[in-house]
Image: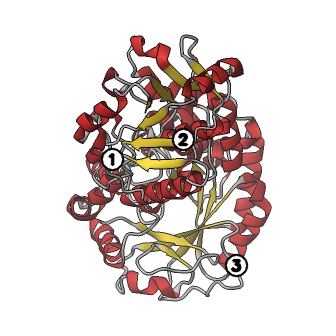
Amino acid sequence: MSRIQVLDCTLRDGGYCNEWRFGATNIRHIIDGLAHAGIEIIECGFLSHKISYKSGVSRFSTMAQLFPFIPQERDGKKFVVMANYGDIDVEKLEERSDDTVDGIRVAFHKKDLEGALQLCKQIKEKGYDVFVQAMVSLGYSDEEFLSLINRTNAIQPYAFYIVDSFGVMKQSDLTRLFYIVEHNLSKNIKIGYHSHNNLQLAYSNAQSLVNIQTNRELILDSSIMGMGRGAGNLNTELFVEYLNEACGTEYSLTPILRLIDEIISKFHQENYWGYSLPNYLSAKHNIHPNYAKYLSDKNTLTIADMDIIFKNIVEDRRINYDKQYIEELYMEYMNKEIVNDERLFDFKKKLIGKKVVLIAPGKSVEEEKEKILSLIAQPDVISISINFDYKQKTDYIFVSNIRRFRMLEYASIKKVINTSNISAEECFVKVNYASLVNEEERVSDNAGLMAIKLLIDLEVEEVTLAGFDGYSYLSNQNYAETEMKLTYRQEDFDALNKGMKCVLNNYAQKIKLIFYTHTRLM
């Protein structure tokens, strides 16, 4: 079955998981391992003339930076890079030589079709094999797709791709597009398929394409362990094993398994990729997966809430990720409930003449519980716990997180101060969500900071803070209650602590902050 070739895109698509920081040694090992496994086309990373190259990163700004990674003996293998349209200046592109990669894959959106096809032609004139990668193939009507194919025929690239950018294709979608391409694309141009795994269909779709009765030469993209943004891609190790069994190919699995064991599994532990409900929803609504990542990273929404927000994304904003737009939709959703200012004014009067204690769910509130319980038992103290009911001893519970709210016992609801993103009639008082956010992006709606901002707005002059520990690299050390545990990368924890410190320093100019328990935030 020599008509089928595998293109491994681990170093390019997989780079979305680790910011392409594989390390120079690992890049060499991955390329060599894939070559020894018999993978016909190896994608070495991105090419962009808009970046400054950093050693050990698989995003390159010149062909010369790729030289150390490409084996001198290519043994029939092709080595390629991908360039997003707009990131490459053809005037800066070196002519193809024995030292450079063999081909360049040009990825582009429909709106950039004219310029992208012209770029493909210019790259081919410099001697490279060109791969035409029209992203979001299902975003084209049949008429538009036929026009694209006909214009591709005029360029005569190495390959033309069906691209499932959002992982939404069913077998019927893929088959329909394939036959349009097969019947209209020049016979000497290979047909490629690039999939994502949001609906867990990448493997079955690849099998169905292999089993289509055709004499066309096919290229199917995959990555080791499915490494790729969000839900990931087709798994190289699974697919080549299938080809060996079903098609009589002779790929060697051992080098790939060794790469998984020694390199890729470590990246997977640091930053998970694979099936998730947010990624499923992004595919269900046919929207850019970064929308799912944005809302998922908030850790404030249930899946049902995300589903509602996704339904509200207008058609012309679905394909291209717009961070400002999703922020606006998110904030609009979080402010959906009506606030009763009169009840908030009554709460303000309750605070007059009292010492206010805020209790966040940091590990220290368990370690220093006797000290805290003694403090909040004093008659002149009003205690407010944040997103949890601390020992059922606090006077109030401030809740801004829908998930945390649903973890509360029903008996606790009547003492909840909830933000306007949470629908609950029985709560003590509701406050406006947007009024409590800050401008530090990583912690803009951190519940503890929102609670402090509420106290500032209520003209409280001093607050004692317990459980405001800051974040530890050891995720099991961050929360008093294990079910509240969140998993982040080390750099995420650093960013959270930095953001918390910045906002707390700003708030300290408006309200006296007294740290009562151990903290990393001073």
The one nearer the camera, 253 or 156, is: 253
Mark 1 residue crowding within 10 angstroms, few (<14) / some (14–19) / many (20+): many
Mark 2 residue crowding within 10 angstroms, few (<14) / some (14–19) / many (20+): many
Q: How far apart are marks 1 and 2 (CA)?
A: 16 Å
Q: Which residue is drawn at 49% across and 44% down?
A: 297
Lower sequence index among marks 1 and 2: 2
Q: Is residue 5 visible?
A: no
Question: Residue 114, image x and y in percent?
Answer: 79, 62
Mark 3 residue crowding within 10 angstroms, few (<14) / some (14–19) / many (20+): few
Q: Mark 3 points at which residue?
A: 89
Q: Which residue is drawn at 53% across and 31% down?
A: 400
Residue type at mark 2: give it: Ile
Taking the image as shown, residue 440 lies to the left or right of residue 213, namely right
The one nearer the camera, 379 or 203, is: 379
Question: Residue 346, image x and y in percent?
Answer: 63, 20
Q: Is mark 1 on a helix, strand or loop?
A: loop
Residue type at mark 3: give it: Asp
Q: Name the residue under label 2.
A: 452
Classify 485 as above or below 249: above
Do callouts 1 and 2 mark residues in contact (Cβ within 8 Å)? no
User: Which tag is nearer the camera, tag 1 or tag 3?
Assistant: 1
Q: Is mark 2 on a helix, strand or loop?
A: helix
The one nearer the camera, 47 or 379, is: 379
Q: Mark 1 points at which residue?
A: 517
